[in-house]
Amino acid sequence: DARVTQTPRDKVTEMGQEVTMRCQPILGHNTVFWYRQTMKQGLELLAYFRNRAPLDDSGMPKDRFSAEMPDATLATLKIQPSEPRDSAVYFCASGLTGLRSDTQYFGPGTRLTVL
Amino acid sequence: KQEVTQIPAALSVPEGENLVLNCSFTDSAIYNLQWFRQDPGKGLTSLLLIQSSQREQTSGRLNASLDKSSGRSTLYIAASQPGDSATYLCAVRLSNRQFYFGTGTSLTVIP
């Protein structure tokens, strides 16, 4: 049963610290998405990769956030320095996007709390 | 910017009832629309995806329709069950690859 995995599941840190979240997409998927979910804003797309290349990161605060795919089995989302307003659940999703397919498979999320 | 609205925000129905969830969007130039469910503390699970050229999709007791011209989609759930209790979100993809999610409808099916 192929699944998207995310680590850590929970992270509590202090303001100013660096946070790195990791995602392992489903093997064979060619797209990876990073989302942030808060009660206030709902679900927001932060970054979108296809074949490891960033296609869209317009939803991501550029000054402190960075997203990378070092290889096809790992995607990372880094926040440096973290701020209390970054507290949210961060979801990674992967998919096999082609002309007629856009189904995304979500991971369980990383709950980030910045004190 | 695309705005996606879901009404109602919360819905409670007795088991066995048929129900309709609504999703509206402001920009009709969409590429596709997806319906997801989210269980508490979990990620999203894709239920149905409708391409812009399609009018509806069906999976089991679920039927999703799309009317691009009016900027609306509905998710119909037949013979609801307590296991259907979850938050249902619709997501619109624009041709420029941007995805926009609604804030969801929280559904409770009472046994």
Image (cartoon, helix red, strand yellow):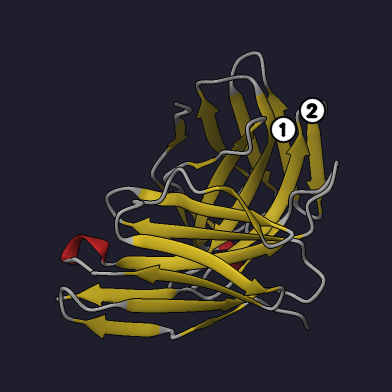
From the viewer's perspective, tell me whether residue A61 is left or right of residue A76: left
Measuring 76% from the left and 28% from the top, which residue is drawn there? B52
| Along the line of sight, the residue nearer the viewer: B7 or B27 | B27
Mark 1 highlights which residue? Answer: B65
Q: On the image, which quarter does residue A13 sit in?
A: bottom left
From the viewer's perspective, tell me whether residue B69 is left or right of residue A10: right
Q: How many marks?
A: 2
Q: Amino acid at mark 2?
A: Arg
- Report if residue B82 is visible in the image: no
| Along the line of sight, the residue nearer the viewer: A18 or A89 | A18
Can you give x and y, in whole percent of width and height, for residue A33 in the image?
A: 58, 58
Q: Amino acid at mark 1?
A: Ser
Above or below, B85 relative to A27: above
Above or below, B26 relative to B98: above
From the viewer's perspective, tell me whether residue A46 is left or right of residue B57: left
Label 2: how many Cα within 10 Å (few below 14, some 14–19, many 20+): few
Can you give x and y, in whole percent of width and height, for residue B31 in the image?
A: 71, 31
Q: Quadrant of the N terminus of chain A?
A: bottom right
Mark 2 highlights which residue? Answer: B55
